[in-house]
């Protein structure tokens, strides 16, 4: 019984850490996108495009890779059982 509880706590901790990391990456991605657009409008095209690319990468990692694949799907499967 004790092993089942500890495995559940470890799984819950992993999901919580993934959710926090997804939130941080999403926020960083949104800020990078905003800064990239501001740089593009200010005339700094190379740096603005780089920031847009990094922002898109952070948004992809935060929303899809961590948020959807590591948080939403496992929680949905746990609730379905």
Image (tube, rainbow, N blue to C red):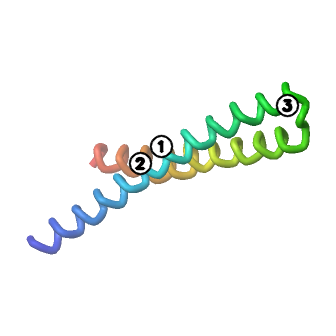
Whole-number angstrom distance, CA of label 1 to CA of label 3: 26 Å
Measured from the top left, where is residue 15 in percent x and y?
Answer: 36, 54
**Which quadrant, please, contains the N terminus?**
bottom left
Residue at image coords 77%, 40%: 52
Which element carries disc 1, helix, strand or loop? helix
The crowd level at tag 2 (other Cα within 10 Å; few <14, some 14-19, many 20+) is many
Q: Nearer the viewer, mark 1 or mark 3?
A: 3
Which element carries disc 2, helix, strand or loop? helix
Q: Name the residue under label 2.
A: 19
Does residue 63 appear left or right of residue 39 in this picture?
A: left
Measured from the top left, where is residue 14 in percent x and y?
Answer: 36, 60
Residue ranking furthest to the bottom: 3
Residue at image coords 49%, 47%: 22
Between residue 72 and residue 43, name the one nearer to us.
Answer: 43
Residue at image coords 47%, 43%: 23
Does residue 4 appear left or right of residue 74 in this picture?
A: left
Is 42 drawn above or below residue 78 in the view shown? Answer: above
Figure quadrant of residue 56: top right
Q: Mark 1 points at which residue?
A: 23
Q: Do the residues bearing badges 2 and 1 touch, measured as CB atoms within 8 Å? A: yes
Q: Name the residue under label 3.
A: 40
Which element carries disc 3, helix, strand or loop? helix
């Amino acid at each position: 019984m004790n092993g089942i509880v500890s495995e559940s706590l470890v799984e819950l901790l992993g999901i919580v850490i993934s959710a926090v990391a997804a939130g941080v990456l999403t926020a960083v991605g949104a800020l990078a996108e905003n800064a990239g657009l501001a740089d593009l409008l200010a005339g700094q095209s190379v740096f603005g495009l780089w920031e847009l690319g990094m922002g898109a990468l952070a948004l992809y990692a935060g929303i899809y890779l961590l948020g959807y694949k590591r948080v939403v799907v496992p929680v949905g499967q746990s609730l379905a059982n």
